[in-house]
Amino acid sequence: MSKSEDFSLIKRLPPYVLSVVNELKYKERAKGEDIIDLGMGNPDQPTPAHIVDKLKEAVDNPRNHRYSSSAGIPKLRLAIANWYKRNYNVELDPDSEAVVTIGSKEGISHLMLSILSPGDSVVVPNPAYPIHIYSVIIARGDIQNVSLSNNEEDLIESIEKTIKEVWPKPKVLLISFPNNPTTQVVDLNFFEKIVDLAKEAGLIVVHDLAYADLCYDGYKAPSLLQVPGAKDVGVEFYTLSKSYNMPGWRVGFMVGNKKIIESLRRIKSYLDYGIFQPIQIASILALDGPQNCVEDIRNLYKLRRDKLIESFSRAGWKIPKPKATMFVWAEIPDEFKEIGSLEFSKLLIKESKVAVSPGIGFGNYGEGFVRLALVENENRILQAARGIKKLLR
């Protein structure tokens, strides 16, 4: 290979494990097989009508067809500040403590480019949403994995131990609760300890709050920014994709520490002109308008969660009931553990006609598990359970 073809960054990015299952799913469907897709977390319901109507209205105004602002239009940043005040009683300056992103995935990726130098290390609990790991690699940083323990004290200790033992000291801690893929939740006390640890270690905390609204059974997800002094050390991401059924719209935002906000705003000013303005205008209505649609979306996922847990249990696969997210994190049945999560996922497609995401796709600590997304209706979930039962009998 010539020097011009030596793509060093691409070599650091392994083949996307989750795509292996997707390719097999497409092949089976091409053969005429009816595959129930519980793999990708892609909401299947339409965006609420009042948000769509606002988009149509805004599109009809030609003034909205021009370049927008990469940081987000002022009224959308104000709506973000209002959302935080309403939901978490957190005060934000919309001009200096909020920036709009093209979904949280883009925001996290560009944030890492803006705050990391080559060789800087980032502590990431594993299993993790893939971009939490690969955004660091793309920014030429180094990943320090810690096992995502269900015990909050153990997780804090693991993070603290890694910070003390790694040299040079890690620069960033990237966390996400409620967690994708494991559905793990934490309380506000956890974030209080994280903020104390970050201040002591001189660490930047980045928290991905993508599933803030998809919580069940009386649980409410806390925000990192509820902790006094959190804005001294950290930022938080949120996305409209899940709470408002707006995945294809690509609208998210980051809030918190002014210097970190400014770093992302600056790099984005070189890379994009922001989201199409009618989408931003409709997003203002999503955040500031009636919120009963969020409750409806949450209730739908809860109904599907209950149906999946109940029907899969009858089929012979006992799975804990998650308190949050649109996912279920399931340990592989004992008789299939030795083949691993990737081969088990392939087996589910071929024998049960059900697609899931192998745990290994979320990091080495995800081995032994699979993730199921609640993106099929109740009848399809029951159909999936029947397919599972044939495999497990």
Image (cartoon, grey):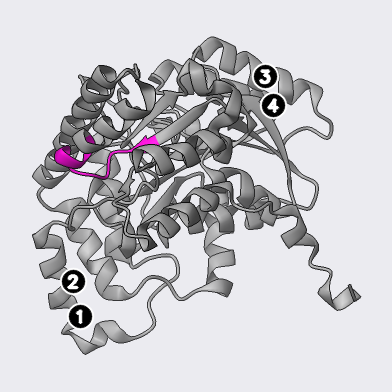
Which mark lies nearer to you, 4 or 1? 1
**Mark 1–mark 2 contact, CB under 8 Å?**
yes
Circle 4 packing at 10 Å, graded few (<14), some (14-19), many (20+), is some
Crowding at dot 3, Cα within 10 Å, few <14 / some 14-19 / many 20+, comes out as some
Name the image quarter holding the C terminus.
top left
**Within the image, what quadrant is residue 9 found in?**
bottom right
Q: Nearer the viewer, mark 2 or mark 4?
A: 2
- What is the C-alpha distance between the residues marked 4 and 1? 48 Å
Q: Which residue is mark 1?
A: 59
The one nearer the camera, 250 or 203, is: 250
- Mark 2, secondary structure of its residue: helix
Q: Nearer the viewer, residue 316 or 256?
A: 316
Say which element carries label 3. helix
Question: What's the residue type where badge 4 is placed?
Answer: Ala
The residue drawn where x is 25% and y is 86% is 63
Whole-Å distance between the Cαs marked 4 and 3?
A: 9 Å
Residue 55 disc label: 2
Disc 1 crowd, CA 10 A, few/some/many (<14, 14-19, 20+): some
The residue where tag 3 is placed is 160
Q: In the structure shown, which secondary structural element does the residue marked by tag 4 occupy?
A: helix
Instruction: From the image, tell me which residue sits under label 4.
Output: 201
What whole-number distance in Å separates the C-alpha atoms at marks 2 and 4? 45 Å
Query: Does the residue at mark 3 contact the one at mark 2 (Cβ under 8 Å)?
Result: no
Number of numbered callouts drawn:
4
The amino acid at mark 3 is Glu
Q: Which residues are magenta?
A: 372-381
Separation of marks 3 and 1 at Cα, in angstroms: 50 Å
Lateral position of residue 182 relative to residue 165, left or right: left
